[in-house]
């Protein structure tokens, strides 16, 4: 299966609000919702984050069906660095390498289009599949504190 990234859109809330209420998706993340996310709350959140100039938020979509299956973003963009985040919201696509493909494309966008020098992320040390995927994409383990592994990739490394 092939994927592509496109800019996140407000109408993506019609699908993504369901993901935000699925505890399986948020098992390994520190940013899980603390309440039920309604369609209206999701729309408001998307409208708010799309205004942030220090973020680049994308939808992960399948070719050729255009099915929207997850989100990927670079946040805290400053001094030519950014923090990476990803999730595949459609569980049937977990374990198929799509997150790795999306990560490689987001890294390319970060370095070639956003002109970043470094992209970093934090991952739960129990999320072995994600750690392997990040290593496969060229990320390097930097440190581990309180169960969170910090990884990074630098341009042209």
Image (cartoon, rainbow, N blue to C red):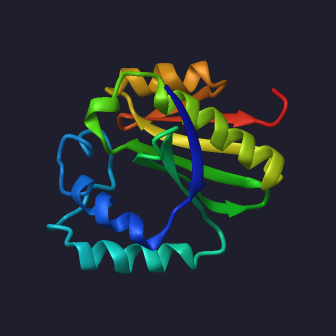
- The part of the image, by quadrant, that contains residue 130 is top left
Q: Considering only vertical position in the picture, is 10 above or below 84?
A: below
Residue 41 percent coordinates (x, y): 27, 77
Classify residue 103 by image quadrant: top right
Q: In the image, is 120 to the left or to the right of 25?
A: right
Number of numbered tags placed on the structure image? 0
- Is residue 145 rendered to the left or right of residue 79? left
Q: Is residue 32 left or right of residue 96?
A: left
Q: Looking at the image, which residue sits at the far front? A: 64
78 vs 148, nearest the viewer: 78
Q: Nearer the viewer, residue 82 or 11?
A: 11
From this viewpoint, is residue 42 visible?
yes
Residue at figure coordinates x 36%, y 38% from the top left: 146
Q: Residue at x 30, y 41 (%)?
A: 90
Query: Against 157, is 54 above or below?
Result: below
Between 40 and 49, the one nearer to me in the picture: 40
- Residue 118 % position (x, y): 74, 44
- Which quadrant of the figure contains the C terminus? top right
Q: Position of residue 70 (x, y in %)?
A: 41, 47
**Which residue is depicted at the point 18% across and 57% down?**
21
> Looking at the image, can residue 151 be seen?
no
Q: Is residue 140 above or below residue 108?
A: above
Tell me the residue at 79%/50% (across/down). 116
């Amino acid at each position: 299966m092939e994927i592509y990234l496109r800019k996140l859109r407000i109408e993506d809330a019609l699908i993504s609000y369901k993901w935000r209420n699925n505890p399986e998706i948020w098992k390994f993340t520190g940013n899980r919702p603390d309440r039920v996310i309604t369609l209206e709350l999701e729309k408001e959140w998307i409208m708010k984050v799309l205004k942030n100039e220090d973020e680049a938020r994308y939808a992960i979509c399948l070719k050729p069906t255009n099915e929207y299956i997850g989100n990927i973003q670079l946040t805290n963009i400053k001094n030519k660095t950014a923090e990476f985040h990803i999730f595949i919201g459609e569980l049937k696509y977990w374990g198929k390498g799509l997150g790795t493909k999306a990560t490689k494309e987001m890294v390319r966008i970060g370095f070639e289009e956003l002109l970043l020098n470094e992209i970093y992320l934090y991952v739960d040390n129990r999320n072995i599949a994600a750690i392997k995927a990040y290593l496969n994409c060229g990320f390097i383990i930097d440190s581990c504190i309180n169960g969170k592994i910090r990884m990074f990739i630098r341009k042209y490394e």
